[in-house]
Image (cartoon, grey):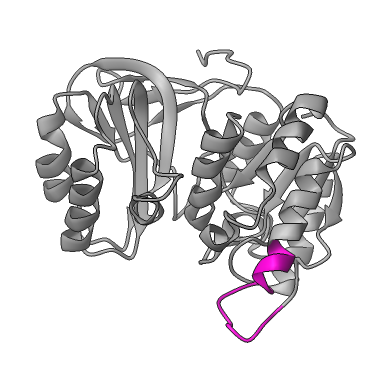
Amino acid sequence: MRPGDTVALVSPSGPPDAAQFERGVRRLESLGLKVVAGEHALDRQGLAYLAGEDTARAADLQTAWCDPAVTGVFCCRGGYGAARLLTLLDWDAMREAVRRQGPKVLLGSSDITALHTAFAVELGVPTLHGPMAACDVIAGDDDGPEPRTWESLRAALFGQADTVTGDRVLAPGRAEGVLRGGNLSLLASLCGTRWQPSFAGAIAFLEDVDEEPYRIDRMLTQLLQAGVFDGVRGITLGSWEQCGDPYPVLEDRLGRLGVPIVAGLPVGHGSPQISVWLGALGVIDTESCSLAGSTRNGEQAR
């Protein structure tokens, strides 16, 4: 992206806090971006965990993606609800927008994993896994965004590749491939749908929050039995906030795949939240316990 570009804020999942939403707008404007809000970005409805009706949330997302004046579509927050939109989006119209205008930036994490995965399947475009406009690390208070999170997001948006370092190695080696994945719970929930993920020939990225180790075991077992990990080249593990000690089960379930695994990357929930491009080339190296990412145009981090 470039200063002067327009980004649209949409709420495909849970309802954002209005004060954090306004602070998020100001933060993004400080990057030189023009910010517009989806018509229904601050809607509420009878189900309090959803930001407005499904049709309204889907309309905001599709309108922003297809608008030639919009360069980036930034999600306000996670929660729950993005998967409910997948059958409501006109994927043909969104593919035509990519053909005519080129790919745009879809930014979000957590529940937005449903959109990251579906965009990869339907549109074949890279998307940005990173902090959302109305989340604590960007819009939390008047002291400003969390510095490392903010710098990583700025670098990712404006085309500077980054290297993310973890704190442990679960299986040694080096691997290169397109980075795919996101929130473990959402990936498991897409099994059996037309948007079921596949890590064949790719580096898998996984993270989650508020999940007990036995539930992590259950979701990994589901993905393994569904063949999602068949042909995976390597695995990166992000943050596991409030998940107890997840590493014994992660090593037990994933270590038998015989591929390099780096863990403890500050990507996902918690603070900081480093931004990484999904659908772009990545390299994991267990000697440096790192994931070297690339811009969506393929420039490798150094």
Locate residue 58: give its quadrant: bottom right
Give the vertical position of 253 relative to 50 (above or below).
above
Q: Nearer the viewer, residue 254 or 224?
A: 224
| Residue 130 seen in the figure | yes
Decide if residue 69 is on the left or right side of residue 242.
Answer: right
Tell me: residue 116, above or below residue 217.
above
Residue furthest out toward the bottom: 46
- Where is residue 235? Give x, y as percent: 29, 31
Residue 151 % position (x, y): 63, 37
**Magenta highlight range:** 44-57
Q: Main secondary structure of the magenta part?
A: loop
* Quadrant of the drawing holding the N terminus: top right
Q: Nearer the viewer, residue 160 or 104?
A: 104
- What residue is drawn where x is 54% and y is 20%? 294
- Using the image as rendered, state which of residue 87 and residue 63 is in the foreground: 87
Q: Is residue 173 magenta?
A: no
**Which image quadrant is residue 153 in?**
top right
Mark yes or no: residue 10 visible: no
Using the rendered view, name the quadrant where residue 105 is placed: top right
Residue at image coords 71%, 29%:
103
Q: List x then y, in percent, for residue 11.
A: 68, 62
Q: How many labels does the image show?
A: 0
- Out of 119 and 204, give the one closest to the viewer: 119
Left or right side of 149 for 191: left
Relative placement, left or right, of 6 versus 295 is right
- Residue 170, horizontal then vertical, whole percent: 17, 33
Which residue lies at the image location 75% right of the left edge and 66% below the top edge?
Answer: 41
